[in-house]
């Protein structure tokens, strides 16, 4: 999303950032994963829009995984 660039309205903002991310989004979908982790709140919005998967902060993913360990 390149910082706030992808938050801008229109063809030279959000729309362009989604086109640039399209290949990555496809790889996420094809991976079969159910979760994506990123520390960037702005990137998490774009990934969620582009992939349709749950996006969490990496520390939340670690916390969730560690809660399942006996």
Image (cartoon, grey):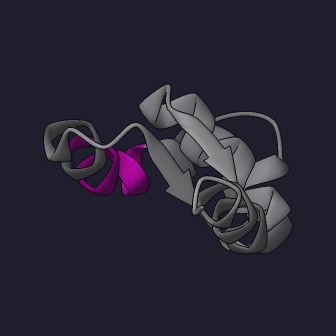
Magenta stretch, main secondary structure class:
helix
35 versus 2 height, above or below: above
Q: Could you say where residue 33 lies in the image, as x and y percent from the top left?
A: 31, 43
Q: Could you say where residue 22 lies in the image, as x and y percent from the top left?
A: 32, 45
Camera-nearest residue between 6 and 37: 37
In the image, taking residue 43 as reference, residue 26 lies left or right, namely left
Q: Could you say where residue 44 lies in the image, as x and y percent from the top left?
A: 69, 52
- Residue at 59% over, 60% down: 65
63 versus 33 height, above or below: below
In the image, taking residue 49 as reference, residue 32 lies left or right, namely left
Quadrant where the N terminus sits is bottom right
38 versus 51 height, above or below: below
In the image, taking residue 33 as reference, residue 52 lies left or right, namely right
- Residue at 83% over, 60% down: 41
- Report if residue 20 lies within the magenta region: yes
Whether residue 41 appears in this view of the structure is: yes
In the rendered image, the residue lying farthest to the front is 70
Camera-nearest residue between 10 and 25: 25
Report the span colored magenta. Answer: 19-26
Quadrant where the C terminus sits is bottom right
In the rendered image, the residue lying farthest to the top is 52
Camera-nearest residue between 50 and 37: 37
- Residue at 26% over, 36% down: 29
- Residue at 50% over, 43% down: 18
Camera-nearest residue between 67 and 34: 67
Whether residue 12 appears in this view of the structure is: no
Q: Quadrant of residue 42?
A: bottom right
30 versus 62 height, above or below: above
In the image, taking residue 34 as reference, residue 39 lies left or right, namely right
- Report if residue 12 lies within the magenta region: no
Q: Quadrant of residue 61?
A: bottom right
């Amino acid at each position: 999303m390149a910082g706030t660039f992808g938050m801008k309205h229109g063809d030279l903002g959000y729309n362009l950032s989604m086109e640039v991310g399209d290949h990555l989004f496809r790889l996420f979908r094809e991976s079969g994963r159910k979760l994506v982790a990123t520390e960037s709140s702005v990137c998490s919005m774009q990934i969620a829009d582009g992939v349709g998967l749950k996006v969490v902060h990496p520390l939340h993913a670690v916390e969730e995984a560690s809660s399942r360990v006996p």
